[in-house]
Each structure stands twice: as structure tokens, then as C-alpha cells.
Amino acid sequence: MKKKIAWIAVFLAAYILQTSLLNLVSFHNINADLLLLLTVSYSLTHGFRRGAFIGFCSGLLQDVASGTFLGFNTLSKMMIGFGFGFMIGRVYEKKIILPVISSIVATAANYLISLIVILMLGYTVNIMQNAYNLLVIPLVYNLCFSYLMHRIVCWLKNKSFDE
């Protein structure tokens, strides 16, 4: 039970940090998506079922708190958590390159899923401008925080709360 509370606290702290402190250093009102990074690392270390669930919960938190389209972030993070969860046992979680590559792939997947949903809703999109704003800038920010978020997930996964 303590571990579940700790996980909830980590995700809430990441969301609060993402929407408050990181907004101070945002570029064009775009900053790191810490919940995406946590979802990916959690999925890599806990599997596809838990990854999809945590992606659903973190995306829903973002959707409800932001007031935008409900389900937009929920869908993309759930799909990303599900997909990355299949890598459990195939990757060594202590490799430094793992969070870097996974953050690149996850940010690109998040962009593509968002773009597909926007196009399916019938909106017109300037793909080049959106690629810069919704892919390049978040990619740079996510690369800066990917290793730290992955280390937090690995530490909390291996932490014993039986004391």
C-alpha cells in the first residue's frame, strides 16, 4: 500500500512540477512532458498492462486539469504505455541510453497520435509549424529530463517499503 501511495505521489509531483515550475522556463508555452517520461519508464519496468493503466491515469489527469479535449492525452499516453510495456525483459533498465532513446520514440509517437486525432476531428493543420512546436521543442525538453525520470522510476521500483 505504501508503494502505491509513493507512485501516486511521484506522478502528482511530476504533474505539479510540469505545470508550475517548468512553465517558468517554457519556450512558446511548451515544456517537458514529465508524465509521458514517467509513463514510458514505468511501462518499461512494469509491463504493458500496468503501463497502459498508468498511461490512462496520467493522461486523464492532464486532460481533466487542463480543460482541453477530454481523452486527448489519455488516449496517447495509454497507447504509449501499452506499447512500451511490451519491452519489459527485453531491455536492461540500468543502461543510460534506454531513457534517451525511449524519450525520443515516445515524444514522436505522442506527436503522431496527437496529429492523427486532430486530423480525424477535421481540423486543418500546418504540419511543419506543428512539428516544430509539438515535436522538436518537447523533444529537447524531454531529453533533458528523461534520465532523471527513469532513475526515479527504477529507484522506486526497487525500493522496499516494508520497514
Image (tube, rainbow, N blue to C red):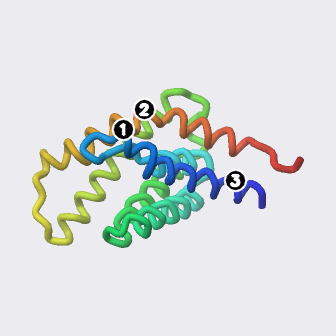
In this picture, residue 87 sits left or right of residue 112? right
Nearer-N-terminus badge (2/3): 3
- Disc 2 residue type (three-letter): Cys
Name the residue carrying label 2. Answer: 144
Mark pair 1, 3: CA separation = 27 Å
Residue at figure coordinates x 38%, y 46% from the top left = 23
What x and y, as percent, mark residue 93? 60, 35
Mark pair 2, 3: CA separation = 24 Å
Nearer-N-terminus badge (1/2): 1
Q: Are marks 1 and 3 in contact (CB under 8 Å)?
A: no
Name the residue carrying label 1. Answer: 25
Q: Is residue 31 above or below residue 11?
A: above
What x and y, as percent, mark residue 58? 50, 60
Q: Are marks 1 and 2 in contact (CB under 8 Å)?
A: no
Residue at figure coordinates x 50%, y 53% from the top left = 15
Mark pair 1, 2: CA separation = 13 Å
Q: Is residue 24 above or below residue 1?
A: above
How many residues crowd around disc 2 within 10 Å: few (fewer than 14), some, or many (20 or more)? Answer: some
Q: Is residue 76 above or below residue 100?
A: below
Viewer-nearest residue: 49 or 127: 127
Secondary structure of the residue carrying tag 1 is helix
Name the residue carrying label 3. Answer: 6
Secondary structure of the residue carrying tag 2 is helix
- Disc 1 residue type (three-letter): Val
Nearer-N-terminus badge (1/3): 3
What x and y, as percent, mark residue 55? 49, 59
What x and y, as percent, mark residue 5? 70, 58
Residue at figure coordinates x 65%, y 54% from the top left = 7
Secondary structure of the residue carrying tag 3 is helix
Circle on res. 121:
none
- Disc 3 residue type (three-letter): Ala
- Residue extending farthest right: 163
